[in-house]
Image (spheres, rainbow, N blue to C red):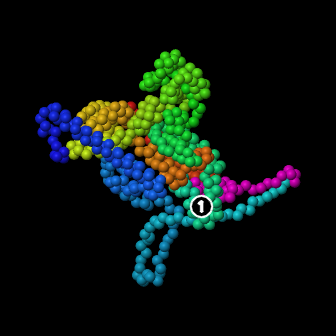
Amino acid sequence: MLEDLDLNAIQEENARELVKRLLNMIEQLSGEVRGLREENQRLRDENNRLKGEQGQPKIEGHKKASAPKGEHSSETERRRKRKRHKKSKKQDVAIQREETVKVDPVRLPADAKYLGCEDVVVQDVYLRADNVLFHKERYYSASQHKSYLAALPAGYEGQFGPGIKSLVVTLYFGVGTSEPKIREFLQNMGVQISTGEVSNLLIHKQGGFHAESEAVYEAGLRSSPWQQVDHTETRVAGQTQHCQVVCNPVYTSYHTRPFKDRLSVLDVLRQGRPRLFRLNQEALAILEQVPLSKAAQALLPQWQSEDVWEEAAFVQRLETALPNLNSQQRTAILGAAAVAAYHAEPGVAIVDTLVCDDASVFHWLTRARMLCWVHDGRFYKKLEPVIALHREQLETFRKEYWEYYHQVLAYGARPTAQERTRLETRFDELFTTHTGYHDLDQRIAKTLAKKEALLQVLVHPELPLHNNASELAVRQRVRKRDVSFGPRSPLGVQAWDTFQTLADTARKLGISFYAYIQDRISGLNQILPLDTLVTRRARELNLGWSWI
């Protein structure tokens, strides 16, 4: 009966509204039942695990299994099919040697004529141990009472040469291989190495790489006024910490911190400098959005100034003057004052716009936020109406949603003031749609409320419409975490952040990560510093603002 329901056939307005309410009530109850079933299944699975049994397997496509995390992806709608042009491998393959293959003269008849050669490119690698016994010359000077000993070539310090050192770092951070598998691989190559020695090659004596990673981040922050951010968990010595990823088209930087609150994200954007606080007009304007106590509302405006406070002094002043603040109010005041100090900080790279999701920790940090359209689109895909009319309404709206997305995408390639005005008008038309399907109408209203953040691209056409770049970078950390679980010491955390930064940045710059690592370890330094290349590539891509 509900499948054939036509609201337009109901003549009386009150009756039509009553039917709409009943249909929305059915949707609400169906959603509650679906949630209770999933919760019941989770509890049953947990009960079975406590008994030593197995829970229900999570098989993709299985109706009773809980939905996989990626099931609500909007990539199918976002992407449009493009023609693929397969290019020849020969164009990109570097030739190390050439060899002429001759025809066996016995096979040739007497009248055979030479017609030249037919070229065939075959790719191969040659893996073998290269264990070297160095005879280090020694001299002794009687007049100087001093011995002179020849130094080993660069990269050969310790028990292992630059080849092994470079390969270990590349396999672990560039490929995502576990330490036991790296050791197994090297042993198959005839190298005698322990698990501890593999670990030491990864985390010890990497000061030069750490410095270059920091320089890459500094150059990256200065390379464009906008940055993309995202975060994921990282287990450190069994404890949950959080990895913040900051990137743009020319670099990626990883930063693991104990917390993921606003101050921690701000610490990352400020490159770890000591925290500063400034309770100026900007900070007070931010705090107008926060429900503060009457005492705080009366006192804080009296503190307004451009004075800069160090963390210990500012916290002490706050605790002395406002001892009864709850944790939320205290956190808000600290966050607002820290953000205001960051925006007024001289001589450093200040991020103007963040491309991110709508997580609260990213609020306030920059002048503007460009919200990810793909994130917003996922909420529509999560709607699961049971009424045929609602399914039709949802499908119709989602088609219009992604059609509008592609129009905005086309605007980014060829922006004009006329098209900007049209797209702003169309946004208001589309996201004031009223369908009568309550859940869909609520979702549309939430998108409308984010208009300014979703349409930053109309002001700055170079901004991406999605946050896929930082999500892909986060996925690299997740894959690393799946294989190696997590670092176990501060040195390990530093190594994970440093080498994942260098690996992903090298990829974006079109540089072999293995070649880069070997170049640095061997002391050749033929590859320019990555921060220099980041700056150069950013200029080539013109990542600065273009105003419309």
Name which residue type carries label 1: Arg
Please tell me which residue is depicted at 58% across the width and 21% down the height of the picture: 320
Please tell me which residue is depicted at 38% across the width and 56% down the height of the picture: 59
Q: Is residue 140 above or below residue 494?
A: below
Q: Is residue 105 above or below residue 277?
A: below
Task: Indicate the quadrant where residue 393 lies.
Answer: top left
Q: Which residue is mark 1?
A: 183
Please tell me which residue is depicted at 55% across the width and 40% down the height of the picture: 258
What secondary structure is marked by label 1? helix
User: Dot 1, crowdedness within 10 Å: few (<14), some or many (≥20)?
Assistant: many
Can see residue 496?
no
Please tell me which residue is depicted at 44% across the width and 55% down the height of the picture: 48
Can see residue 486?
yes
The reply to whether the magenta stretch includes residue 144 is: yes
Residue 493 locus on image (x, y percent): 58, 46
Q: Residue furthest front?
A: 51
Which range is magenta? 142-169
